[in-house]
Image (cartoon, rainbow, N blue to C red):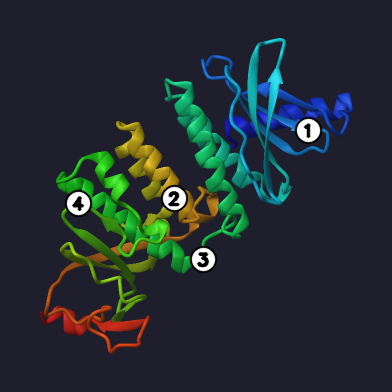
C-alpha cells in the first residue's frame, strides 16, 4: 500500500511531465490539506523526489555529504514563509525514502512548536545521510534481523515489567549507537544475545561488553526460523509496529525509538514481512564475579581487544 507522500509524488510527476519543468525548477503539492502542518511532496526538473516542510522563520543550514540525498532552503516570498526541502538524488532508493518521509510527516503532525520541528528534521536528516552513505538503506541481512528482533523483544518484556517509564526504556536502548551493552539504565545494564536452537555458545565481541560499574544482566533469546503463517511467528515489521503503539503515548519515547531504528539500519519494508522467527525461550544470567568473562582488568597486560565464545552449557550450570 502506497503512503500519502508516495501518492503525492505520483501526482507531482504527472503534472511535471505535462508542464516541462526547467532543470532548476520544482513542483510541490500539499500532502494533507487538512493538517495544520504544511508538508509537501514534489519533484524537481530532473524528476527527483522532494519532501518540503514549511516553517515561518528562516531554518538553519545543514551540511550534507551524500550522493543520495541533499537539502536546501527556499524562501516563499508570496507566503512570507520558508521551505526546508529534502531531495532524493538516487531514484533506486525511492521506496526507502518514501517510508522515511512518511514517518517524518506523521511525527511532525504531533509537534506543537516550530523550533522542535526544525530540530527533528535536522536530526533525521543526519540519520538518513548516515543510513544512505553506509549502504544500510537497502536491506538488513537475516542475522541482523535476528539480532535486532531479540533486542526489540527484550524492550517489549522490559515494558511489560513496568519497572521503568516508557521514555526511560526507549532512551536506554543504546545498542544501535554502539553502546557497550544494548540497554543502559541508571541502575543496571542489559546485554542481549540471539541464538538458534541447538546453539552451544554465545559470542562476546569486546572486553567491555560484559564489564560495567553497574550490575550486568545477560539475556539470551533462542529464536527459531519460522514460516510467517505460524501462530507464534514474529516479524521485524510486526514487533516494530507493536512497540510504536506502546510508545506512542509519550512523543519523546517514540522519537528515541525511531531514531535508534534508523541508527540500526532499519526502515520498514515489505521484505521483512517474509522473515519470521519463533521465540522459543529467553534465559537471563547475572554477570557476577563467578561469571566466565574477559574484561580489561582480567586479561594479561598488552591485550587490547578480544572476541570469544562463552559456553551456554557452562552458564546453565550456574
Label 1 vs label 4: CA separation?
48 Å
Label 3 vs label 2, nearer the camera: 2
For label 1, the residue is 44
- Residue 20 lies in what quarter of the image? top right
Instruction: Please state which of residues 85 and 34 is positioned toward the viewer in this rendering.
Output: 85
300 with respect to 50 (left or right): left
Can residue 200 be spotted in the picture? Answer: no
Secondary-structure class at tag 2 = helix
**Which comes before the other along the chain, label 4 or label 3?**
3
Q: Is residue 193 above or below residue 120?
A: below
Kindly indicate whether the residue at mark 4 contacts the one at mark 1 (C-beta within 8 angstroms). no
**Which comes before the other along the chain, label 1 or label 4?**
1
- Residue 79 lies in what quarter of the image? top right
Q: Residue at x 35, y 75 (%)?
A: 206
Q: Residue at x 14, y 46 (%)?
A: 163
Label 1 vs label 2: CA separation?
29 Å
Q: Residue at x 33, y 62 (%)?
A: 278
For label 2, the residue is 261
Amino acid at each position: 500500500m502506497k503512503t500519502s507522500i508516495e501518492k503525492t509524488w505520483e501526482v507531482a510527476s504527472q503534472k511535471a511531465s505535462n508542464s516541462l519543468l526547467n532543470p532548476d525548477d520544482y513542483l510541490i503539492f500539499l500532502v494533507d490539506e487538512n493538517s495544520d502542518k504544511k508538508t509537501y511532496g514534489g519533484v524537481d526538473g530532473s524528476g527527483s523526489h522532494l519532501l518540503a516542510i514549511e516553517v515561518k522563520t528562516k531554518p538553519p543550514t545543514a551540511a550534507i555529504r551524500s550522493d543520495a540525498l541533499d537539502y536546501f532552503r527556499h524562501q516563499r516570498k508570496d507566503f512570507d514563509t520558508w521551505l526546508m526541502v529534502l531531495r532524493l538524488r538516487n531514484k533506486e532508493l525511492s521506496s526507502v525514502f518514501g517510508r522515511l518521509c512518511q514517518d517524518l510527516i506523521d511525527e511532525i503532525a504531533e509537534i506543537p512548536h516550530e523550533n522542535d520541528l526544525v530540530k527533528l528534521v535536522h536530526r533525521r536528516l543526519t540519520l538518513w545521510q548516515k543510513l544512505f552513505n553506509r549502504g544500510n538503506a537497502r536491506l538488513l541481512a537475516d542475522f541482523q534481523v535476528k539480532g535486532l528482533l531479540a533486542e526489540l523483544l527484550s524492550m517489549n518484556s522490559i515494558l511489560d515489567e513496568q519497572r521503568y517509564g516508557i521514555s526511560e526504556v526507549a532512551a536506554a536502548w543504546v545498542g544501535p549507537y554502539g553502546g557497550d551493552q544494548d540497554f543502559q539504565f541508571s541502575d543496571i545494564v542489559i546485554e542481549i544475545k540471539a541464538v538458534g536452537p541447538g546453539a552451544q555458545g554465545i559470542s562476546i565481541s569486546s572486553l567491555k561488553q560484559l564489564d560495567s560499574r553497574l550490575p550486568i544482566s545477560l539475556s539470551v533469546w533462542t529464536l527459531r526460523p519460522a514460516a510467517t503463517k505460524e501462530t507464534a511467528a514474529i516479524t521485524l515489521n510486526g514487533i516494530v509496529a507493536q512497540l510504536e503503539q506502546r510508545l506512542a503515548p509519550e512523543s519523546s519515547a517514540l522519537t528515541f525509538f525511531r531514531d535508534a531504528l534508523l541508527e540500526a539500519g532499519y526502515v520498514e519494508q515489505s521484505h521483512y514481512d517474509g522473515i519470521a522467527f519463533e521465540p522459543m525461550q529467553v534465559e537471563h544470567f547475572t554477570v557476577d564475579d563467578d561469571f566466565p568473562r574477559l574484561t580489561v582488568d582480567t586479561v594479561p597486560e598488552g591485550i587490547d581487544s578480544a572476541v570469544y565464545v562463552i559456553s551456554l552449557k557452562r552458564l546453565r550450570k550456574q
